[in-house]
Amino acid sequence: MKKTTFFKLFMLFLAVGVASCSSNSTDDGGDTGGSPGTSALTLTVDKSRVYDNTLVSYIVRDAAGANVTSSAVVTVDGQVASNGIALLSGVGAKSATATLGTETSNTVVVTVIAPSFTTKMLIEDYTGTWCIWCPRMSKSIQDLHAGADGDRMIAIAIHNGSSFAFPLEAQMRQRFGVAGFPTGILNRDVEWNASSNNSMNLNQPRALLNTVRPLGLAINSSLSGSTVSASIKVGFDLDQTGTKLVAVLLENGRIASQANATSNYGGLNPISNFEHNEILRANFTDIFGDVIPDASSVGGGEYSATLSVAVPAGVNTANMEIVAFVVNSSNEVINVQRAPVGTNQPFD
């Protein structure tokens, strides 16, 4: 009797164990495609935010981590992406999945956005009151400012050898390979070409306004005694890495004699009552930029810096402005903003 009972119990436990093993074996055998969370396929993408009409690359990997993109089918909002490459158009969220056999991957979402910021460009004018050819560049900058996109072209006059000289001018000149005066550096990247003894090539800086920029700046500043304080914000459309912020203080409207060998300004030499503008006077940041942490340079995010600088002696505090710009890891200007001291310039 006891043996019979024991045998029945043993057979019952054996049956339960077999049933359990059979169930686990079925789960481990693979996904039917109905539950992406248990799929052996993993889908990734090279960007999470892009502008309209941008190519993105999706990568599909199997359970072993091997790249199986060429064998898989990647579908973005119902459209097949050949070789995992898709042109995303139309603002909004674009959802993608991949399939390979009976496997279906996780869902990846890329957000397509319209540009948020106005593209502007920077001209750094290496100049001096003693420089006979410098009125060529001064006049060309004035002509740019007077044009249709004049407010999108921002200049900084970096003086040498006069009462307007900037203390770090020699370091800047060395860093950017300035060999003579005048020299114009556009976006800290290329030298501005002259078209004649009297003018620069105006189309060269204008062409830099045609590139959409992934970030913009806002400036809010005040003057207290001889100290200028500024709150500078950088807004990011897209993720960026290796960026730096540069902010400087300029002075406008200074009257001083200017040497002149050009036919500009009536061909006078010297020009006794020449108005000097955009004179670089002080720097809020390192003149080559303060690092913006990559964690603060995320698309859709914003970076803020609160800065201050003492106004150098002799500067007319009633006629100052701030220029702020962001450079990339190659020290090229991405975008730039200006605002008179004591005003609030929002993102534009």
Image (cartoon, rainbow, N blue to C red):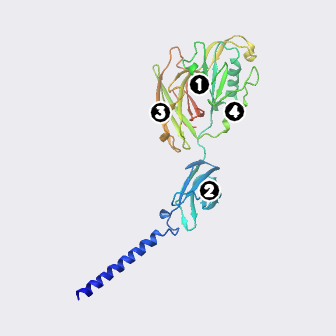
- Label ID, residue 237: none
In the image shown, does 73 or 292 lie closer to the viewer?
Answer: 73
Q: Mark 4 falls on what kind of element?
A: helix
Q: Earlier in the sequence, mark 1 or mark 4?
A: 1
Instruction: Verify CB contact (< 8 Å) between mark 3 and mark 1.
Output: no
Residue furthest left in the image: 2
Name the kind of residue labelled 4 in the image.
Answer: Arg
Q: Mark 3 falls on what kind of element?
A: strand
The quadrant the N terminus occupies is bottom left
Q: Earlier in the sequence, mark 4 or mark 3?
A: 4
Residue that carries the numbered disc 4 in the rendered image: 206
The span from disc 2 to disc 4 (Cα, nearest Å) is 37 Å
Q: Earlier in the sequence, mark 1 or mark 2?
A: 2
Name the kind of residue labelled 3 in the image.
Answer: Ala
Name the kind of residue labelled 2 in the image.
Answer: Gly
Residue that carries the numbered disc 1 in the rendered image: 175
The span from disc 2 to disc 3 (Cα, nearest Å) is 40 Å
Answer few, some or many: residues within 10 Å of disc 1's Cα (few below 14, many 20 plus, some between 14 and 19). few
Answer few, some or many: residues within 10 Å of disc 3's Cα (few below 14, many 20 plus, some between 14 and 19). few
Q: How many marks?
A: 4
Residue that carries the numbered disc 3 in the rendered image: 305
Horizontally, residue 67 falls left or right of residue 227, namely: right
The quadrant the C terminus occupies is top right
Residue 330 appears in view: yes
Residue that carries the numbered disc 2 in the rendered image: 84
